[in-house]
Structure formats: C-alpha cells, structure tokens
Image (cartoon, grey):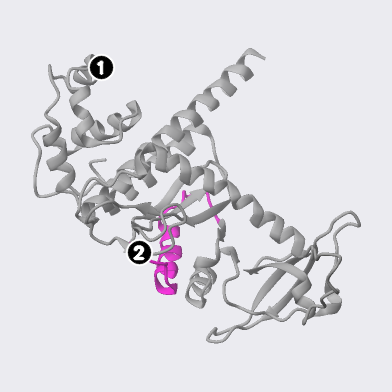
Amino acid sequence: FDSAYQPTARKPRLGHYSMMVGLLMLLFIGFNRIWHFVYVRLDAMLCGFFNVTCLPAASTFWRFVNSLGINQAKSLLKVMSILRERVWQLCGLEFDQIRINIDTTVKTVYGSQQGARKGHNSQHRGKQGLRPVLGFIEETREYLLGKLRKGKTIDGKEAAKFIADIKRHLPGCVHNVVIRADGEFLSWQAVKAAIDAGFKFIIANRGCTPIFDPDKWYRPSKGKAAEYNSCTYQPGGWKQPCRFVAMRIAKELKQPASQPKQCVLFEDDKYTHRIFCTNMAGKAHMVIADYDKRADVENLVGEAKREGLDMIPSAKFKTNYALFQIVMLAYNIWRYMKMIAKNSASVDQSDNN
C-alpha cells in the first residue's frame, strides 16, 4: 500500500493506511454508508485492530473520503495489481490466457451530483445517473479495472483508452487476452486499440451492416434451429476490414387465420440476427458460443453494486470516483479470501490423500 498509494495533502491522525482499512472493514461487515460508523465505533474487534478504545467519529472518515480524488483512485488500481500478483502466486495460478468481460452499468443518482446525466436507465427511466465501466477476469471472477464515468454512452476514444490500459494491470504470467464486450464498445478506435495491444476480441455489433453470402449459412447440427455465417467487411470510416460472424433464427410470424398471409419484403426480415466483430479464427458458431459465456458478467456487476457500488455519498465527482475503487478493492479482497480458502482446502485434501 505504501509503495503504490498516492496520499492526499491532508494527512489523517490515524494515517492513510488505517483510514483505508477502516473503510474496507466497514464494507466487509455489511455497511455501505460512511455514517454507519456510528454503529461500530465501540466494536471490540475493530477497536482492537486499530489499537484504540473508540473509533473516530463518522465525520472523520467522511472528511478523509471527501479529500480523495482521481489520483487516489488510479493509485488504488496499482494496489490491486500488486495484490493480484501476490494472490495468484500464493494460489499457484498461472493463466497463460485470460478472458476479460467488459460491461457498463447505471448508477441512478438522487439530488445534484457532478457528472450525472439523463440517458439509458432501464430501471428509472428519465432519471439522471452515472455510467461506470467495469472489466472482470472470467477465470477468477475478479475485478481487473474500471472507473466511474459521467452518465453518457462511452465513445470510441474512451473505449480505446480503456482497452489500452488493460495491459498495465495484467499479471506477469498472462500472455494472451480475449476481450468480450457489448455493442457500446464497437468502434474503429476500440478495435484498433485491441489489435495494437495484441488482444483477441469479440464485440457485439452496433450500427454496422455487413453483407453475408446467402449461400454460406450453415447449421452446426441438424437439431439446431440457428444458422451461422461469417464475412470480411470494412465499415465506413474504418482503416481496414474485419471479420464479422452472425447467427440468425427464424421469426415466428403468427397471424390470424382470417387474414391473408403477409409476405415479408426482404429475406432478412424473416430472421432475428446477432452479429459480432472479431479477430478470432474458427467456426462462427464457436466464436459466438465463446461470447455467450460473457453473460455471467451481469452477475458480477450485480454483486459489486450490492457490495457498495450503488453508494454515491458526495456531490463531488472526484470523491465518488475514488470511492468507486475502494468498493472494488473490497470486492476483490472478498474474492481473494474465497480463492485462498478454496486453495487451502485443495492442499489439505491432497495432503490427506
């Protein structure tokens, strides 16, 4: 922590490390509001940990959080990278290839918070919110990187920067990366960033209209209703063509018997399509099956939000930006406790055998 964390100019009496650990332990206990410290100020375990008879007032922790900003948030990502290396080494994890699932979510805000915008908010339509982006490692289900964002759709430049930052947080044993993201990330800037970094990628299509050979649709087996295809296509504004894979399923056109049968105008109108941009080789159905495993990221985002990601304590965007990383650090430590416990149980079992 001391080697990676960038402290603020305001130095708390207990020190930056103790204040940070206090916030983490509050999240571990199950409280996700800073003022909840009033309930644990005399807790014997916490007081013994800090070697005090009574914890500081909740306002002391609030002033500490209020002093945090963008620099502290970035330094916490470095802390997580160091911690990840140590835990992987302790558990004997050596993944040569990992899959990183990227997703955005919405944090609805109430009141006046910096950066809040009206946008796509399926749960609270028309309300302002923030739109954080998160990246998770599929193999370990841990948080790799992310950040709090203003409540607007991510653009190509920002998506490219996010992808380029991935390399700085990878464990040393990882040599190959597969990125899986939804259509919000599809742009030439993002695709170019993945290619330049040497990553494989599967990104859902948004706005591109690749042309597939009608004679090359196939079914991997006779019992499957879906058909698959692939093509090489260069969207407008892109510097080079890319591979697109597609899956289509026939629509069920139900019409009353009293009405005459309505013919579709185009052949494609009879099907529901799913299209993806990728640089991965292999059959189209195998590539899409790989992408479909990304669905678990929704569960991970939900877990993170319940751990405290939905907490927006300040009207200052920079303070919420830093608290976002504190919550995700707590989330990762919780993951690491489970990984170490599972590894210890496996070692004990092998010793008994």
Residue range (magenta): 150-175
Q: Amino acid at mark 1?
A: Met
Q: In percent of the image, x 91 and y 57: which residue is there?
A: 222
Local secondary structure at mark 1: helix
Provide residue 159's location: percent of width, then percent of height.
44, 67
Provide residue 213's location: percent of width, then percent of height.
80, 80
- Quadrant of residue 305 within the rendered picture: top left
Total of numbered circles in the picture? 2
Q: Which residue is mark 2?
A: 118
Camera-side residue of 13 and 258:
258
Mark carried by residue 222: none
Check disc 2: other Cα within 10 Å, few if <14, some if 14-19, many if 20+.
some
Provide residue 13's location: percent of width, then percent of height.
8, 34
Q: In percent of the image, x 63 and y 82: which residue is there?
A: 241
The quarter of the image holding the C terminus is top right
- Quadrant of residue 41 within the rendered picture: top left
Q: Which residue is mark 1?
A: 45
For the residues marked 1 and 2, what is the alpha-carbon distance in whole angstroms?
Answer: 43 Å
Q: Is residue 95 left or right of residue 167?
A: right
Q: Is residue 172 magenta?
A: yes
Q: Is residue 160 magenta?
A: yes
Q: Is residue 59 left or right of residue 154?
A: left
- Quadrant of residue 82 within the rendered picture: top left
Pointer 1 or 2: first along the chain: 1
